[in-house]
Amino acid sequence: MEASFLIDTTKCIGCRGCQVACKQWNQNNAEKTSLGQTFTNPPRLNARTYTNIAFFEGEHGNKLFWNFARNGCFHCKKPACVSVCPVAALIKTEEGPVIYRAERCIGCRYCMLACPFNIPKFEWEKISPRIQKCTFCYERILDGKLPACAKTCPSGTIHFEDSIEKNLKEARKRISENSEKYVNHIYGENEAGGTSVLLLSALPLDQIGFGKVSEQVLPDLTWKYISGIPAVIGVVLAAGIGSWIITRRNKNMDKEGE
Amino acid sequence: MMSAERHEIKMFTPLTTGLLIIIIAGAVSVYKRLALGLGATTNLQDDFPWGLWIGFDVLGGVAMAAGGFVIASAVYLLNMKKYKPIARPAILTAFLGYLLAATAIFLDIGHPLRLWHPAVMWQINSIMFIVAIHVILYTTVLAMESSPMFFEKIGLKGVQKFVEKIMMPIALFGTLLSTLHQSSLGAVYLIVPEKLHPLWYSQTLPLGFLVSAVMMGLSMVSFESILSTKFFRHPANMDILSGLARGSLVVTGLYFILKIFLLVKGPGIAAAFDGSMEAKMYLLEMAVGVIFPLILLVLPAVRKGMNSILLVNCLVIFGIVINRMNVGVFGMLRHAKGRGISYFPTGNEIMVTLFMVAAGIFLFKFAVKFFNVLSHEEAEEVH
């Protein structure tokens, strides 16, 4: 199985039930916020908020249109955060979720730097800080239950499947059957080499906070370097020993000449 | 004869007093960081997780330490015995540089007491794992490379002789580790093609870091030799300084070609002149660290004068530090700005960095006073 969400933002009514369910299941405290320019609240993800609904006002079909976007971890197929973690604190599970093993983490925050979606957050205020992010409710999935956000969603926006392929098929079907309703872009199909969370939207995705992310599988970029290391070791050792032998012989010959 | 001269180095000069004040004030900042956490004492935040400490202390500090492996490989692998008198100060600098970089990492990570985790919890896809292993192994190698002067001091001649005998394999291992470590620090940023500004991001970041580290290493060694002459009244060897300058000329030339090639092939020359903050920082880095030094080093007269070499050294050191800051901090700001974030280090962050620099200079001076660092060449000639 490979857990997957199809998040059809056109169905979202902005109730934020998913935010609340997420906080409850993960026992994350509420936080003090203030009124900002939008109704998005809390205004951004942080170590205590794994998911939030961002509110975007736009125009669609010449009418005022609210687009509600659910933010959270995309659970990449080839996650950059997992590849950069020096101690394998973050791992990609067989079932799809990218999960975190706090007891291994050294707090280097390389995962935060590497994530193309800026998802991992840090408990900055703590002396013993952890990385925090959406877990895809890994324990619930193992238990055959729906992730908390999907379970609570009243509008069918967050649709869970045990296969990315099934959700992709469904997403393509929705776009082709209702092409004026959606932009023709399944966000997450190719982004960062493909993710477990797929988004559909009425407004172009960069207008609802999902910036352009290249289709490059990011861990490949570093693997190219790492896989070259044995060759570098060979070259340096050969060059080092070679030049040592040659230069020493020259020196000895000079001495004999004297 | 030389040891008498060494004892003329006074421990309490105005410079040392200044250093001690910075060290004490900095120690308070270090304590605050440990007691209150990163959030309370730094301006690091979710959309800007790495700041001054990574950019300056770690990336800059490790580059400054490159003189150790450059001189060690020249002396022990290429048998260029001419440079043996500067091997001890170069290796000592590298050792101190790595100790301080390790201290910076200790303070920067969220769980300082888990610093050892990468040594047992391997994850070979991670550049950070590779960097961590290199720091551990190379600091050990540097400790071994600097140990002869310690054994000499405490009178263990036999052990000193033994370590000196096996110096070639130690130096070879050190060169290998340094090549990989310097380039790995560049490779750290391979994973952020969309966050690091295109003026700095390229697939050849590892090579760029390695070549510029060699530049920095040569300049640091030369810089120290000249300052030792001025402060510790240790006679300078112009033959060595000119040799280092010739080496710098070749490496700076290579680096210049690489940087121009990357600029043209990557974002294009226009990107360096679009007036943005990044373009200005790039031009500063290139002018100070590459172009001026190259123009100066081409002139034979510059390579023969101590003061002109000192000037070039300062330019290169400053320029390459700017390069590391550009990759680690300035080049990442545009992405953060897009997410509504800006970063400028807190006073506490700056104090911790100053603490590292002051401690490095202080420890170097301390070592020069109590160990046979600078006058090694005469000691050599006795046997």
Image: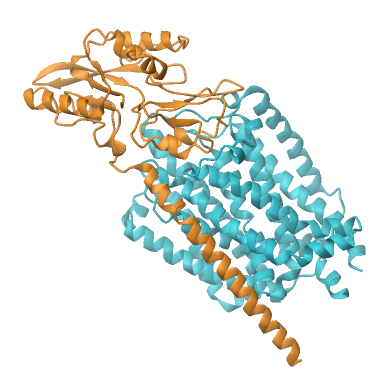
- Regarding residue B1, the answer to whether it shows in the image is yes
Residue at horizontal 39%, vertical 51%?
Answer: B199
Give the camera-side residue of A2 and B360: A2
Residue A255 drawn above or below residue B146 = below
Residue B295: image x %, image y %?
Answer: 51, 70
Give the camera-side residue of B181 and B324: B181
Residue at horizontal 36%, vertical 15%?
Answer: A36
Residue A45 drawn above or below residue B216 = above
A67 relative position to A100: left or right: left
B60 relative position to B49: left or right: right
In the picture, which chain is cyan?
B
Residue at horizontal 35%, vertical 54%?
Answer: B273
Indicate the quadrant containing the C terminus of chain A: top left, top right, bottom left or bottom right. Answer: bottom right
Q: Quadrant of residue A178?
A: top left
Give the camera-side residue of B125 and A202: B125
Residue A58 drawn above or below residue B181 = above
Q: What hue represents chain A?
A: orange
Indicate the quadrant containing the N terminus of chain A: top left, top right, bottom left or bottom right. Answer: top left
Image coloring type: by chain
B159 relative position to B318: left or right: right
- Regarding residue B248, the answer to whether it shows in the image is no
Residue A212: image x %, image y %?
Answer: 27, 36
Q: Quadrant of residue A65?
A: top left
Q: Quadrant of residue B370?
A: bottom right
Residue B259: image x %, image y %?
Answer: 42, 61
A217 relative position to A256: left or right: left
- Picture mark count: 0
Residue A63 drawn above or below residue B218 = above
Give the camera-side residue of B262 and B186: B186
Residue B104: image x %, image y %?
Answer: 63, 40
